[in-house]
């Protein structure tokens, strides 16, 4: 069974216990230095102090990553350009993507435009790195013979709802991230059995996702209450991830040929809707609405692809 472990303490100290070049993927959601209350500490340092803190933990992250490893870093607008500079010019890591996480609800403002996104930097340790595109594709909007119906690249704008307070999986944490968001990073940038590190574990989302996706994972967390929260969360029964990219449920248009449609739709469930509680039924209802009836595969085993490219 893969190692799933949450360690209590300061990330800068706990990094010392991680061997050099031993980690395949790091997903980091550090404090944004905006003054949030995390129970036993406040996210508010002086400007230079925060940059020094960032430089120190990013240097450790670079050290522990394998040459094929990847780092994702969440960050607010005030400091993200400084983190980019540290990673690019100071640590000489390889820039990959600047991802925009677009969410539908956020802080309201009356004297400016309300924020509706967070930024995520994706850097690689070297020019050779893991990237599993097939694992994170999204359905094509239209069926065309020239399209790869295994799906399209999801792009660098990711739309996932916040984990709302009415969600059964909502934890008592101020910055909980959606599981679907973390799932995409884990699937894209690691393989089964590999080691993922989350140096600012918070509500434990990365550990919970890795637990379900057959990855090993180690999390660091300063607040002992959040450590216990994570341990309790990891013991809960799993019924499906708490969020989804809405494109995964969409039905491609123009699937007029019945045989092609039946085979594609069977594979759609296998390709895109695993670990999606309730999404398969919603998808089948959309199929019935668009094409007149639910596909015959609805209660049968999905088929292996033969009509569609796996490139």
Image (cartoon, rainbow, N blue to C red):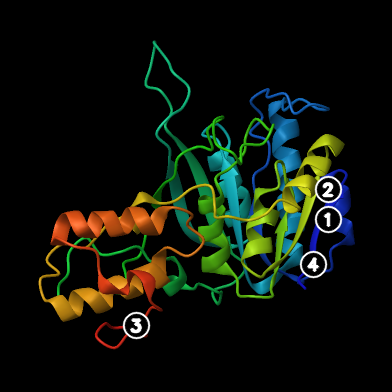
Residue at 27% over, 73% down:
296
Upstream in the sequence, badge 1 or badge 4? Answer: 4
Quarter placement of the C terminus: bottom left
Disc 3 target residue: 310
User: Is residue 200 or residue 298 the one in the foreground?
Assistant: 298
SS at badge 4: loop
Disc 4 target residue: 3
- Name the spot of residue 199 as percent of width and height, x first: 74, 50
Disc 2 target residue: 12
Question: Alpha carbon of mark 1 to alpha carbon of mark 3: how far?
Answer: 39 Å
Residue at 40% over, 51% down:
245
Question: Alpha carbon of mark 2 to alpha carbon of mark 1: how far?
Answer: 6 Å
- The extreme bottom residue here reads 306
Question: Could you tell me if the residues under marks 2 and 1 are in contact, i.e. CB atoms within 8 Å?
Answer: yes
Quarter placement of the N terminus: bottom right
* Rendered image: mark on residue 15: 1
Question: Could you tell me if the residues under marks 1 and 4 are in contact, i.e. CB atoms within 8 Å?
Answer: no
Q: Is residue 155 above or below residue 257?
A: above
- Name the spot of residue 253 as percent of width and height, x first: 15, 62
Question: Alpha carbon of mark 4 to alpha carbon of mark 3: how far?
Answer: 32 Å
- Name the spot of residue 303 as percent of width and height, x first: 36, 83
Upstream in the sequence, badge 1 or badge 3? Answer: 1
Q: Is residue 110 above or below residue 71?
A: above
Instruction: Give left or right: position of 260 versus 214.
Output: left
Residue at 17% over, 64% down:
142
| Res. 149 image quadrant | bottom left
Question: Alpha carbon of mark 2 to alpha carbon of mark 4: how far?
Answer: 21 Å
SS at badge 2: helix
Q: Is residue 159 above or below residue 306?
A: above
Question: Alpha carbon of mark 3 to alpha carbon of mark 2: how far?
Answer: 42 Å
Upstream in the sequence, badge 4 or badge 3? Answer: 4
């Amino acid at each position: 069974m893969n190692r799933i472990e949450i360690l209590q303490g300061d990330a800068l100290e706990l990094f010392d216990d991680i061997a050099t070049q031993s980690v395949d993927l790091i997903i980091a959601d550090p404090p944004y230095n905006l003054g949030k209350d995390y129970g036993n500490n406040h996210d508010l340092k002086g400007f230079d102090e925060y940059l020094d803190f960032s430089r120190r933990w990013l240097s450790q992250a670079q050290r522990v990553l394998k040459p094929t490893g990847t780092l994702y870093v969440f960050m607010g607008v005030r400091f993200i350009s400084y983190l980019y500079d540290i990673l690019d010019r100071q640590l000489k890591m390889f820039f990959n993507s600047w991802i925009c996480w677009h969410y539908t609800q956020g802080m309201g403002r009356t004297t400016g435009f309300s924020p509706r996104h967070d930024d995520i930097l994706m850097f690689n340790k070297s020019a050779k790195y893991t990237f599993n595109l097939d694992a994170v594709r999204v359905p094509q909007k239209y069926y065309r013979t020239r399209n790869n119906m295994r799906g399209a690249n999801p792009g660098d704008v990711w739309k996932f709802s916040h984990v709302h307070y009415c969600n059964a999986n909502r934890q008592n944490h101020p910055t909980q991230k959606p599981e679907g968001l973390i799932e995409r990073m884990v699937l894209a940038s690691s393989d089964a059995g590999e080691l993922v590190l989350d140096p600012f574990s918070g509500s434990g989302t990365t550990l919970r996702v890795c637990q379900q996706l057959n990855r090993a994972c180690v999390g660091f967390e300063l607040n002992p209450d959040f450590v216990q929260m994570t341990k309790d969360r990891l013991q809960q029964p799993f019924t499906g991830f708490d969020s989804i990219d809405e494109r995964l449920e969409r039905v491609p248009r123009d699937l007029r040929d019945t045989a092609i449609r039946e085979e594609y739709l069977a594979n759609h469930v296998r390709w895109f809707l695993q670990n999606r509680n309730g999404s398969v039924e919603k998808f089948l209802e959309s199929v019935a609405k668009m094409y007149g009836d639910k596909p015959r595969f609805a209660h049968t085993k999905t088929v292996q692809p033969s009509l569609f490219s796996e490139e």
